[in-house]
């Protein structure tokens, strides 16, 4: 029987449409999905809600917004507005976390500390809107490999420090195993996160990376991550939410949808929970 | 005039022999070199010492040993013995630091905390030999990208914690900008390192990485690292040693030796010190 904590993040089946993914997930007993904004917009919110309701699926995340660390002025305004629209979407889908990626360094600017503070300021700006909607933004530390181009926020402790004075029901952290497994502080940091854990995502790690560095994420068990201690640390800290399988991998995406889903379920059971 | 703190690590001119590198470095006024063990063995210790003396060069490091985190039994014994031979070599070359790389996870073993403790234990075993020789081992945190295959030690704070009860004159840390620039704790961690800073190496960072992930290190100014605050933090913490330029990069290695050296000197002056 499929674990009721398992959520299929749509990135894992990127090559297939949202209706196909929902049908395939539902068939094997998956109970939750993490949704990306673009595929929802493609078929429309009403159709998405109908598909989800018919399949008995809940939504564990709306992915993804942010990328504010390198922006100011109109570009920052547009990124904030996109986040508000994602909050609106979440409010229509049962109020799952909205995943928030920090963003990288501005072109020609090497001040990573200042960039991280801009992420904090952007989140503070968004707090009233998130609070009014009853939706939580989930700041996701990303692997340090991507500190310059995708996320100046790289560790759980750094994320916690940045959001320390923001209300926990409006802004939390998203713990991703691929991003944080190497951190000598990962287990205590998950403990420190406590009620601020807004979400949890799994994929496995190994080197060398493919040419598209972002797409080196592996199915659980194919890499070096010991998942259970990380999951247990989050659950001990109070996290009761779904655990999303989110895998960026060109070889995986080339497989038949049923195969991807079957491997997601079986490797989750074997390695995660 | 070439900065007297600049040291040319031999990895930067990997395609050229030790005599060629020493001659080219000396010609432009470089005062220090970081030596790799294999090229020294190729021409012999006596010839190396003569070349260095004639060129007026001092040695800032002997590279590199360690790789103990994944080993036990005879393999561990051999790694420790190789470290003792590197200490012997250092003792013949003016007692520069011996760079020590933690090593990755054993095949099929995912316990990264246990692996890190094996690094600590190996260093403790080596302390008497290093102390007798008056040589310092320099534990080098490596970029988290390589946590599984090269170094389970990824941050300065983790290295400091591991060596906290070992004598500072026998075991220190090597701070490498490529490895640590992204760390939100890097500046305070360098301060915490204080007298334990055994060495400092520079190269620049950018993504995407080349197919050989290790060889993505760039000449200073070609990436995103703000070097001066890192160098100043080390100097404020008491570090007075040479700053090694160590760059793994296939494109760089394909350039003429004089070009590599000229770029080393000019980018060091522009971006580092």
Image (spheres, coloured by chain):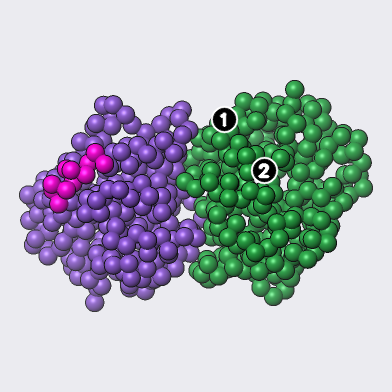
Chain colours: A purple, B green
| Residue A158 appears left or right of B118 | left
Chain of the residue under label 1: B
Quadrant position of residue B28: top right
Against B140, residue A78 (above or below) is above
User: Extreme top residue here?
Assistant: B1
Q: Is residue A48 visible?
A: no
Question: Marks 2/1: CA distance?
Answer: 25 Å
Q: Could you say where residue A213 lies in the image, as x and y percent from the top left?
A: 45, 46
Residue position marked by numbered label 1 in the rendering? B221
Q: Main secondary structure of the magenta part?
A: helix
Q: Position of residue A224 (x, y in %)?
A: 48, 64
Which residue carries the number 2 mark? B238
Give the residues in magenta.
A124-134
Q: Are marks 2 and 1 in contact (CB under 8 Å)?
A: no
In terms of secondary structure, where does tag 2 sit?
Answer: loop
Magenta stretch: residue A131 in it? yes
The local crowd at label 1, few if under 14, some if 14 to 19, many if 20 or more residues have their Cα within 10 Å, is: some
């Amino acid at each position: 029987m499929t674990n009721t904590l398992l959520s299929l993040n749509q990135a894992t089946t990127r090559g297939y449409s949202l209706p196909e993914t929902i049908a395939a997930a539902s068939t094997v007993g998956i109970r939750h999905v993490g949704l990306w904004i673009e595929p929802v917009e493609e078929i429309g919110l009403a159709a998405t809600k109908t598909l989800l309701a018919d399949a008995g699926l809940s939504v564990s995340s709306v992915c993804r917004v942010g990328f504010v660390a390198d922006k100011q002025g109109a570009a920052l305004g547009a990124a904030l507005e996109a986040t508000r629209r994602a909050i609106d979407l979440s409010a229509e889908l049962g109020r799952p976390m909205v995943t928030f990626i920090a963003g990288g360094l501005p072109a020609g600017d090497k001040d990573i500390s200042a960039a991280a503070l801009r992420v904090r300021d952007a989140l503070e700006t968004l707090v009233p809107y998130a609070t009014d909607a009853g939706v939580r933004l989930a700041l996701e530390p990303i692997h340090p490999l991507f500190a310059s181009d995708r996320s100046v926020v790289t560790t759980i402790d750094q994320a916690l420090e940045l959001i320390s004075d923001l209300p926990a029901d409006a802004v939390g952290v998203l713990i991703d195993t691929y991003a944080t497994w190497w951190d000598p502080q990962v287990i205590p940091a998950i403990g420190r996160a406590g009620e601020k854990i807004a979400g949890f995502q799994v994929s496995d790690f190994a080197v060398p990376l493919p040419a598209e560095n972002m797409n080196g994420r592996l199915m659980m068990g194919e890499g070096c991550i010991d998942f259970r201690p990380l999951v247990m640390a989050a659950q001990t800290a109070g996290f009761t939410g779904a655990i999303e399988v989110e895998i960026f991998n060109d070889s995986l995406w080339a497989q038949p949808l049923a195969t991807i889903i079957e491997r997601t379920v079986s490797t989750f059971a074997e390695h995660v929970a």
